[in-house]
Each structure stands twice: as C-alpha cells, then as structure tokens.
Image: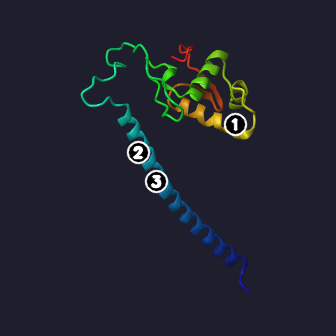
Amino acid sequence: MPSVMGLLEERERVARQRVEALQAELQEAEAVWERFVIARQTVAEVLAEPPAGEEASPTGVTGERPARVASAVPGSVVSAWREGLDTDVLAPDYQRLVEVLAGSGEEMDCRQLAAALGLEVVPAKVEGVRSKVKRLAARGWLLEERPGMFSVPAGRAGGS
C-alpha cells in the first residue's frame, strides 16, 4: 500500500506538470494577442497618416487647433488624448461617457455611469461600460484615481 507522503508527492508532481503546461499555453496565447495588438496599432497609424502628396494634419504641428476634426464612427480606435483634441475624435459611445462624467463634475463608478446613460444596471451592461471607461482612462481621456471610480481630468470639463 502506498504511503500518504508518496500519494501527496505524486499529486504534487501532476499539479506542477499541469501548471507548467498552462503557463506555456498562456505564453503562447499572450504572444498571439500581442501580435494582434501591434497589428491593430500599426493599421490605426497607417490609416491616420494622410495620403502621399497631401499635407500633414495641422493638429499639433503649429499648436493651432483645427476647425473641425472628422467625427469618429462606432468601432473606431480610441486615440490617446493630447492637447487640442476634442471628444469629436471618439466614437459616439465614448463621447457620451466623457460627456456624462464631465456633466456630473464628480467621480462615478460603472454602475452609476450605466444608469446615467439610461442602460439597465445588469452585469453585462455594466461590464461594457467598464471596458470603455478603462480604455478611456488608459488613453488619458479619463482619470481613475481610485479603483473603479472615474472622472474627467481637471481643466477638461468640456471633454476637450
């Protein structure tokens, strides 16, 4: 009859092998994911460049703000915020999130934002809002000073 310690060692060995296999699978999945992120960023950069022979966009070159930047469409990439950009460059859903936060003047969590947008406060809708505000925060449009609490940075009350 096998000893208790022998049984535990065997189970530990099996668990370690499974962890190593999962880590290898995770590394492979992360590499694939990273390639897609780089591809998406590259395509976004290429699409943002003016066609050959045309002048570069005036944004940021002379410090002047263009009269009107073409509005984004649903599904477009959320660009990083920089001086001179207005919320017009964001897709409509993202514009609404920034406007609601700017209008409230205070921090809001994702449940509050979902309610303010007129969405049902159910996990699926709240998580959709969460992914969008996290993306906006990562790109500099919003602040997340406390986990899960979002606001518009001071001085950008209009979203610009």
User: Where does residue 65 sit, x and y in percent of width and height?
Assistant: 40, 14
Is residue 134 shown above or below 16?
Answer: above
The numbered mark, 2 or 3, whose residue comes first in the sequence reads: 3
Mark-to-mark CA distance, 2 and 3: 11 Å
Residue 67 in percent (x, y) is at 41, 13
Disc 3 residue type? Val
Of the image marks 1 and 3, the number of the one nearer the N terminus: 3
Asked whether 141 or 116 is in front, the reply is 116
The amino acid type, in three-letter code, at marker 2 is Ala
CA gap between label 2 and label 1 equals: 28 Å
Residue located beneath label 3 in the image: 32
Label 2–label 3 contact, CB within 8 A: no
Q: Position of residue 17 (x, y in %)?
A: 57, 69
State yes or no: discs 2 and 1 in contact (Cβ < 8 Å). no
Q: Quadrant of residue 106?
A: top right
As drawn, is 70 to the left or to the right of 5? left
Q: Is residue 155 above or below residue 57?
A: above
Which mark, residue 39? 2
Mark 1 vs mark 3, CA separation in Å: 28 Å
Residue most toward the bottom?
1
Q: Is residue 134 left or right of residue 83?
A: right
Q: Which residue is mark 1?
A: 125
- Residue placed at 72% from the left, 26% from the top? 118
Is tag 2's residue or tag 1's residue first in the polypeptide sequence? 2
Estimate how packed mark 1 is, as few (under 14), some (14 to 19) or many (20 or more) residues with alpha carbons within 10 Å.
some
For label 3, the crowd category at 10 Å Cα-Cα, with few meaning under 14, some 14 to 19 and many 20 or more, is few
Callout count:
3
Residue 133 occupies which quadrant of the picture? top right
SS for callout 1: helix
Q: Is residue 66 above or below residue 16?
A: above
**Depicted 9 relative to depicted 46: above or below:** below
